Image (cartoon, rainbow, N blue to C red):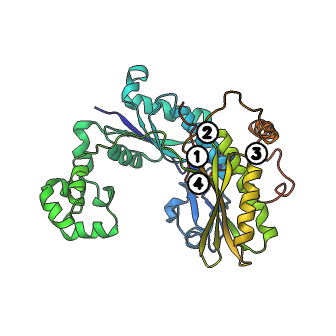
Amino acid sequence: MRAIIHVDMDAFYASVEQRDNPALRGKPIIVGGHAQRGVVVAASYEVRPFGVRSAMPMARAMKAAPHAIVVKPRFSAYAEASEQVFAIFERYTPLIEPLSLDEAFLDVTASVGLFGSPADIARRIRKEIADELSLPASAGIATVKFVAKIASDLAKPNGQREVRPEETVAFLAALPVSRLWGVGPKTEEALKLAGLRTIGDVAAREPEWLEERLGSSGRHLWELSQGIDVREVVPDRAAKSVGAEDTFEEDLTGMDALKTHVHSQALRVGRRLRRAGVKGRVVQLKLKFADFTLITRRTTLREATDDGQAIYRTALELMERSHEGKPIRLTGVSVQLDEVPPQLGLFPAAPPRAAKLNAALDKIAERFGSKAITTADIAGSEAPADDEHRSERPVDKPKR
């Protein structure tokens, strides 16, 4: 019998903002961008009663809650907090499947002998997150991933819920069919037309009856309604690339306006590569124009690199060939990782000067922050620091 915990940070970005700025605690805050074209990145629990949710257009959110305090996203702060949260997970199990910066599945089946019951482990994790990071987290405990995820949703905010094996079918029965994984608006409508409004209604039908009406997904939905989910927690999903991108508050025109952002993105990518101990040869530039046209350009270097300056020079060449003078709303830089590490020589060469410089800069950044020392064009600019993309986990070091 497996023991699965789904840990989900509560209103993660908003909670980090409230933690770091005491004046925001208990206040209705919206983490988001431009008031007219941006979207809500996160909404504190104080603003949610007004109907504000993440991914909602900012214009609609401000109309629903005009009194809310708007805070610009600080992805570097969220990435740092995420790394600290995942470090706490690693105290209890190596079987961690990240879903985003703020949630993950943990398989603690082999950990109960050391740390107690799955519910005890979840309580310890949440307490350590609260004590060490001053952030709230919720957890769901079950024998399968699907049920653990629903349990953590229902435990929010700042709670936990355990669903024992014998309770699983009854726990799911009263929930709406929209809770079933794979049920979107169209499938939900089809289920309702068939008289199936709750998960219990689906569980009461024969799988063959469901297959006749829904095709191959019918049996899948029936299995979920019975609490059957054979998927395992898959740790350390190999990242194929490392990237950084920014959507601008206002469209930018001209190379001079764009260079600083591309430079910042390249340096962030280089630092992430070095932190993970990986390199890559394929450099890609992404440009999204004001009309939402998206183009990507890439080139392959002769040797793999983790040097942000080399990545910047390559990205700049790509931009000079691709930039048409039209307003741009987003730029992004990424490096595709080498799948096979280079063979080491019998007598390894001395590290190049760039490697020594990067190592020194990394040490300074680790101690004083990524903006403690930077290039002249980035200093004082609005280009973000060494942040991660909001939906990415930092790439893991490869196993030896």
Residue at 76%, 42% in the rendered image: 369
Q: Secondary structure at mark 2?
A: loop
Quadrant position of residue 88: top right
Residue at 77%, 35% in the rendered image: 351
Q: Secondary structure at mark 3?
A: loop
Query: Which residue is identified by label 4?
Result: 390
Q: Earlier in the sequence, mark 4 or mark 1?
A: 1
Quadrant position of residue 227: top left
Q: Earlier in the sequence, mark 1 or mark 3?
A: 1
- The reply to whether dot 4 and dot 1 touch (C-beta < 8 Å) is no
Q: Callout 4 environment at 10 Å: few (<14), some (14 to 19), or many (20+)? A: some
- Circle 1 or circle 3, nearest the eye: 1
Residue 207 location in percent, x, y?
15, 56
Outermost residue toward the right?
376
Q: Earlier in the sequence, mark 2 or mark 3?
A: 2
Query: Please, is residue 113 above or below residue 254 in the view?
Result: above
- The reply to whether dot 4 and dot 2 touch (C-beta < 8 Å) is no
- The reply to whether dot 3 and dot 4 touch (C-beta < 8 Å) is no
Position of the C terminus by quadrant: top right
Label 4 amino acid? Arg
Query: Which residue is identified by label 1?
Result: 338
- Circle 1 or circle 2, nearest the eye: 2
Q: Which mark is residue 370?
A: 3
How much space separates mark 1 and mark 2, taking CA atoms? 9 Å
Q: Earlier in the sequence, mark 3 or mark 4?
A: 3
Query: Which residue is identified by label 2?
Result: 342
